[in-house]
Image (tube, coloured by chain):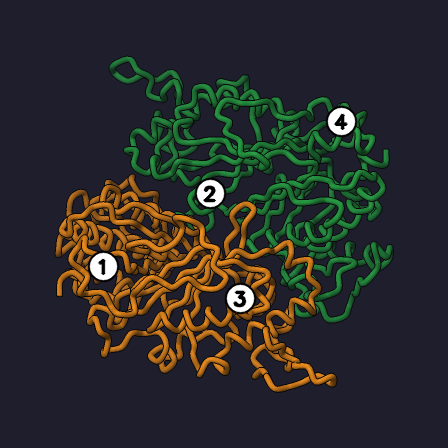
Chain colours: A green, B orange
Amino acid sequence: MAELNRRRFLGRLAGAGVAGAGLVIGSTSVLDAAPASAATESAVAFRGQHQAGIVTDVQSNLAFAAYDVTTTDRATLVSMLKRLTAAAEAMTQGAPVPGDTPADTTPRSPARLTLTVGFGPSLFDDRFGLAARRPAALKPLPALPGDQLISGRSNGDIAVQACADDPNVAFGAIRDLTRIGNGVVASRWTQFGFGRDSSTGSNQVTPRNLMGFKDGTNNIRNNDASALNQFVWVGNGADQPWMRGGAYLVARRIRMRLEQWDRAPVPEQEAVFGRKKASGAPLTGTGEFDRPDFAATNSDGSLVIPADCHIRLAGPDANNGLRILRRSYSFHEGQEAGLFFIAFQSDPEAFVTLQRKLGSHDALDTFIQHTTSGLFACPGGLTEHGEDYWGSGLFET
Amino acid sequence: MAELNRRRFLGRLAGAGVAGAGLVIGSTSVLDAAPASAATESAVAFRGQHQAGIVTDVQSNLAFAAYDVTTTDRATLVSMLKRLTAAAEAMTQGAPVPGDTPADTTPRSPARLTLTVGFGPSLFDDRFGLAARRPAALKPLPALPGDQLISGRSNGDIAVQACADDPNVAFGAIRDLTRIGNGVVASRWTQFGFGRDSSTGSNQVTPRNLMGFKDGTNNIRNNDASALNQFVWVGNGADQPWMRGGAYLVARRIRMRLEQWDRAPVPEQEAVFGRKKASGAPLTGTGEFDRPDFAATNSDGSLVIPADCHIRLAGPDANNGLRILRRSYSFHEGQEAGLFFIAFQSDPEAFVTLQRKLGSHDALDTFIQHTTSGLFACPGGLTEHGEDYWGSGLFET
């Protein structure tokens, strides 16, 4: 399947002459240096009904970039989006970037690279004539309890999420896109993250966050088509057709007060989450996937799962069954560390509803601050026809 | 060998009752949950002639911490160093930390964790009566050309370098040491880093730095005993016996102006390093390990390997054969990224000599700034006798 996609992609490049200047197929390049199988086995298809990087099995590393568009000319922006799309597709398939001289890009294997694009509310102002294309749901996230946003590190006109199983591949892809976009888009803020599972523990499935707790026990599974269609994918009834098959990406940089957390006794930590630290079981159970008994009380009448703990406030039982698809990464930047929270949902109001509740009552709030916020509309996937590009549904229809 | 070390370690723990409170061997713990082989195969011996983490095959992730000692009582400090040593040894072997209740520490596999301790010049002031124990070579690094140090992010009384093949293991180890040390040592600055080789490229041996160039082509190999004895290990003639078998660790956080770098044409980048970007070959050669011909000239008489390029200035040919052992990691912290440079040498003057030359003339200087600086004396390894602890040679003799 991966091999098929790659052949199709290379055929399309060769046949269509996409952004042809400098493109060399068959000469000395990473494709020749590496055995074909090495590149293809770790490549994720770039095109399809949905964008890759949303339900793709979570890779171990993240590089996330939000851009400001610096041109005011629509044609210039569209031309750049075409170039970025061609570069993105090439990088995910381990192919040379069209238009780059071979040595501009350091040879990199695909490492399951996915590049997912989203458009921020600010892109739909009066610069590019897109106001009428703005989905009603795409508006800046409101001020939320718990916000302590850092100036200049939120929002953006365009965002790209790069995920890969190699930090150099994810970061390198963002840097190459930034270089190619120079003069038309400029980096506004970036975030680097690392995976939370890897070899930690034996038979680990649910990753642990930096607080040491399993995070994602009840996350939507990427093979649960029913839940994905209900909570994640924008349906055919979307107010803007270009969002069909897409999703809204919420990004929140959550700083954790880890030294304070590490000094809290484990029972106190467990009362904050409502789960046991080692096993991940709810405080009323013994196994990670046991269903929490939110009504259970101790002999003194107090709730076993406290009223202000995270799983009670955030869980679907307390939110009319509401669920979101989380895809978060840990980060560590000198004296700051925490979680770069990413969630995909068909309606960003789902996140706002949950965060309004959490930010006001959650026992976890003592230990965290939200320092970056962003909402981006990620369109549906590109078809197998090479003419599509990032935003073609938005700009061309 | 690893299995033997682990058995010996566990036997020592059980027999000697090291810092015994709360230590549980044989009850539910990570050791029972994981097959014995999983833990032992990825464990690096903690004791030996030299500290681990200096010539150990470079792991993929780094967490580095510099601490201030906050007590002024020597006995309190010594007691804490004993506790930290016991915790460090346990963590590297995948065993429960002595004195911790089982759940305090998140279960983690060893992931080839190494923990390497060093002592900064400031530890040898008048607080602990160590002034007479200070090696003559252990003095604060001088101001160097290229320095743009960030206040509060340099130096420290004690440093610990944690390296592991899992970012959570490296960072978790530092956090556990910080928690255990609370009240006696306090974190001064930390640095997180990621590996530069992993799956990038095929048959990659020499890692690439974030500038996309191979970095370490001529580094001292960890099996080159002769070079290690000449340039890295402090010998028996040391002015302070506790440094025998040790080395001086230089830490420099080097911020790279990557957007500027990425926009520089590749031939200009190659002239900065004196090497070809794709192959790593010197500009006078075709293979990475070809010997540079520093005398070669172009037809117009100019040097093929420019006078101000990195390999000419930093190489042993221009420095009376001087070599250092580098063990650096890349970092990415929001809007900043670069190289956390770590070097080990038997005499820190070796680094100072090289950096004086590089900081004044190196073409690379346009693209980098040194923002953190630290020098730490790493003692020799602990013997197989359990009584040794981090600094015992310094405090007990």
Tell me where residue B63 appears, x and y as whole percent.
40, 53
Instruction: Give the image location of residue A296, x and y in percent.
Output: 35, 17
Badge 1 amino acid: Phe
Q: Image quadrant of residue B397?
A: bottom left
Cα–Cα gap, marks 4 and 2 = 38 Å
Q: Is residue B213 above or below residue B182?
A: below
Q: Which mark is in front, 2 or 3?
A: 3
Q: Relative to residue A337, is residue B92 drawn left or right?
A: left
Q: Which chain hosts label 2? A: A
Disc 3: host chain: B
Residue bearing the label numbered 3: B207
- Mark 1 or 2, which is nearer the eye? 1
| Residue B239 in the figure: left or right of residue A145 | left
Callout 2: SS? loop
- Relative placement, left or right, of B298 versus A286 is right
Disc 3 crowd rating (10 Å Cα; few below 14, some 14-19, many 20+) is many
Position of B101 with respect to A86 (left or right) is left
Q: Is residue B328 above or below residue B310?
A: above
CA distance for labels 4 and 1: 64 Å
Badge 4 vs badge 3, beta-carbon distance below 8 Å: no
> Which chain is mark 1 on?
B
Q: Earlier in the sequence, mark 1 or mark 3?
A: 1
> Which amino acid is tagged 3?
Pro
Q: Which residue is mark 1?
A: B124
Q: Amino acid at mark 2?
A: Val
> Which residue does the numbered mark 2 point to in the structure image?
A205
The answer to whether one can see residue A89 in this image is no
Q: Amino acid at mark 4?
A: Arg
- Label 1 – label 3 distance at C-alpha: 37 Å
What residue did someone put label 4 on? A134
Quarter where residue A18 is shown: bottom right
